[in-house]
């Protein structure tokens, strides 16, 4: 157990702190998100007050995303050119999103209404990802039955083709992602996802990754690495904001980074073993997890602050779901390893894993 | 005058804390990232670039 001078009387379990960093490291590096929505409730379960839970989480996310990006770069999963261009649109979008949220609040719209709208958006995004991934997997299964060679990635959205067809100069070619698209389309998608994230009050990785895949047309695994690259920049900005607000306990963040550095290796290297559709499946369920957390938050606001078991229940469920996501990822990696060595895996899993080295 | 100086020092310290936290996370992230690369090299685990597109067939191209 350790204590921090800024939190007198609160003892934090050192092992669990490192363990949270480790598990979020695996999930974040596998699906390309920072994972603030998982870290904040988990740290609150450990005893951190809410503001410190957010500050410590976002601080460690920046370092952890850097570690994951280094590995993803080695794996060829980072389209730095697209990431840098998109971040310009994202930052502007976040600012507009936050201002829009304040404007809506000033007009007398209650927090409950804003939160309900956010939950609906998250359910739509999560639902679409899971629906599309299921359709893609069915198509892959059919190809496998016809003994066709299965691609690494396949997604069924027609939006990328349309967006790439809008030829407003300057048209930019992204060699890593093998696509040519107007700069304005990239900025617009960045702006849209940033505004959505700013309005919902989240980091936005779970909005950006599906946007990179379904709107821009980037392969899922490159979208993961590129988004983590973007998080280094946006996370750095958040460190500045939270440190100025006095929400950061840097030693707690450092301890989590050590756990996250190992977890990030498992998550990033894990992308070698799977098809893009697996990444999207885990991402889809992860978005449902975010909406679940928000639903509990909404229930907490509606029922009243005196009922602390709702808050505790929400934290425990999210903490538990985090472990389930890790189990899903580790199971996929293990099945791929078995399959590559000629072992048997369930038939339904064959189209999820990547069989070649 | 002392109040002014303390306020200036306070602001200065705030900036130092911001720079310290930001710098520490970036340096730690970069260092651990490269260290992990070296560790996997030492363990003999080879990490190659992922084949995102199959150039041998049309199938791998995204729709």
Image: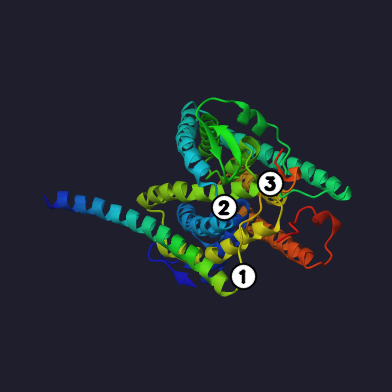
Residue at which label 1 appears: B45
- The residue at 21%/50% (across/down) is B7
Q: Chain of mark 1?
A: B
> Residue A162, located in which quarter of the rendered image?
top right
Position of A269 with respect to B5 (left or right) is: right
Residue pictured at 63% horizontal, 35% vertical: A215
**Labels 3, 1: one chain:** no
Could you say which is closer to the camera, residue A38 or residue A175?
A175
- 10 Å crowding of disc 2: few (<14), some (14-19), many (20+): many
Residue on which the image places disc 3: A284
Judge depth for marks 2 and 1 and give the one in front: 1
What residue sits right under mark 2 in the picture?
A35
Q: How is the image coloured?
A: rainbow
Quadrant assignment for the C terminus of chain A? bottom right
The nearer-to-camera label among 3 and 1 is 1
Secondary structure category for the residue under label 1: loop
The answer to which of B26 and B6 lies nearer the viewer is: B26
Q: Work out how far the residue at label 2 is from the one at label 1, CA to CA, in angstroms.
A: 27 Å
The mark found on residue A132 in the picture is none
Q: Element under label 2?
A: loop
**Residue A146, image x and y in percent?**
88, 47
The residue tagged with tag 3: helix, strand or loop?
Answer: helix
């Amino acid at each position: 157990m350790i204590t921090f001078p800024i939190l007198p009387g609160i003892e934090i379990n050192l092992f669990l702190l490192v363990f949270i960093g480790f598990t979020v490291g695996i999930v974040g590096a596998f699906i390309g998100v920072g994972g603030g929505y998982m870290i904040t409730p988990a740290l609150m379960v450990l005893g951190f007050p809410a503001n410190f839970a957010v500050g410590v989480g976002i601080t460690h996310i920046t370092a952890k995303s850097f570690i994951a990006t280094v590995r993803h770069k080695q794996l060829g999963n980072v389209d730095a050119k697209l990431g840098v261009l998109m971040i310009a649109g994202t930052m502007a979008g976040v600012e507009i999103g936050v201002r829009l949220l304040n404007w809506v609040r000033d007009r007398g719209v209650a927090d409950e209404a804003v939160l309900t709208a956010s939950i609906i958006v998250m359910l739509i995004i999560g639902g679409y990802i899971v629906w599309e991934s299921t359709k893609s997997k069915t198509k892959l299964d059919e190809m496998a039955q016809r003994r066709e060679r299965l691609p690494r990635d396949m997604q069924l959205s027609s939006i990328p083709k349309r967006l790439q067809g809008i030829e407003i100069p300057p048209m930019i070619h992204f060699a890593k992602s093998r696509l040519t698209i107007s700069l304005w389309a990239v900025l617009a998608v960045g702006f849209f996802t940033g505004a959505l994230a700013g309005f919902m009050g989240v980091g936005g990785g779970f909005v950006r990754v599906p946007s990179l895949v379904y709107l821009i047309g980037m392969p899922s695994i490159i979208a993961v690495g590129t988004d983590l690259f973007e998080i280094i920049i946006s996370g750095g900005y958040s460190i500045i904001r939270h440190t100025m607000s006095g929400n950061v306990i840097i030693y707690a963040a450092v301890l989590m980074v050590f756990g996250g550095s190992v977890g990030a290796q498992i998550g990033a290297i894990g992308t070698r073993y799977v098809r893009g559709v697996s990444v999207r499946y885990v991402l889809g369920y992860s978005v449902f997890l975010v909406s679940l957390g928000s639903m509990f938050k909404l229930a907490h606001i509606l029922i009243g602050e005196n009922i602390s078991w709702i808050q505790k229940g929400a934290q425990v469920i999210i903490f538990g779901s985090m472990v389930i996501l890790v189990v899903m990822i580790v199971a996929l990696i293990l099945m791929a390893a078995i399959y590559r060595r000629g072992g048997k895996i369930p038939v339904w899993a064959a189209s999820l894993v990547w069989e070649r080295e | 005058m002392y109040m002014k100086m303390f306020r200036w020092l306070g602001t200065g310290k705030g900036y130092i804390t911001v720079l310290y936290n930001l710098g520490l996370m970036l340096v730690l992230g970069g260092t651990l990232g490269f260290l992990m690369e070296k560790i996997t090299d030492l363990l003999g685990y080879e990490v190659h670039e992922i084949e995102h597109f199959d150039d041998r067939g049309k199938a791998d191209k995204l729709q």
